[in-house]
């Protein structure tokens, strides 16, 4: 496994839990003949556009001080994530079989996230 991508949300408990997991993962003993180039990446998920960016910047500063990699693109929150499960909408976004609607990709910035993700794994 070359990469681990871990989502985080701007919640103190989530950030602390994720950073604890990252620390534990990064301190695992090396295994003979294993890939020593493993990279742990964090990314912001369910970002509410109405929240103050100072909160994200504060967390991001700590993450960078810890020497962890964090993606630039943030996946924005969309209430359609929840509506999709209540049978009232006729759109599909969280399907692994069907393509998401282009409008939802842009709203959530998932299109930009996938581009950045591909750039990371192919570099």
Image (tube, grey):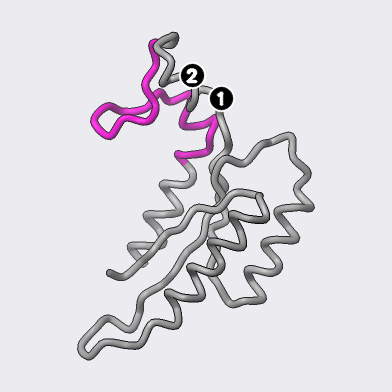
In the rendering, at what x and y percent does residue 22 appear?
49, 70
Quadrant location, the N terminus: bottom left
Q: Quadrant of residue 111?
A: top left
> Circle 1 sits in a helix, a strand or a loop, which is it?
loop
> Circle 2 sits in a helix, a strand or a loop, which is it?
helix
Looking at the image, the residue that sits furthest to the left is 33
Q: Is residue 60 left or right of residue 83?
A: right
108 lies above or below 63: above
The residue shown at (67%, 76%) is 65
Q: Is residue 56 left or right of residue 73?
A: right
The residue shown at (54%, 45%) is 45
Q: Is residue 70 left or right of residue 114?
A: right
93 lies above or below 51: above
The residue shown at (43%, 11%) is 89
The residue shown at (53%, 34%) is 108
- Write the start and end of the magenta stretch as one range: 90-111
Q: Which residue is mark 1?
A: 79
* Residue 83 numbered mark, or none: 2
Q: Is residue 100 left or right of residue 66?
A: left
Q: Is residue 88 magenta?
A: no
């Amino acid at each position: 496994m070359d990469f681990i991508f871990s989502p985080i949300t701007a919640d103190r408990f989530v950030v602390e839990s994720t950073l604890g997991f990252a620390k534990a993962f990064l301190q695992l003993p090396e295994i003979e003949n294993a890939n020593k180039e493993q990279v742990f990446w964090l990314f912001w998920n369910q970002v509410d556009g109405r929240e103050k960016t100072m909160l994200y910047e504060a967390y991001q500063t700590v993450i960078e001080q810890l020497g962890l990699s964090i993606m630039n693109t943030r996946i924005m929150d969309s209430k359609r994530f929840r509506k999709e499960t209540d049978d009232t909408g006729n759109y599909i976004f969280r399907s692994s079989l069907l393509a998401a609607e282009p409008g939802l990709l842009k709203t959530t910035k998932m299109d930009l996230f996938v581009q950045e993700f591909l750039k990371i794994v192919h570099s």
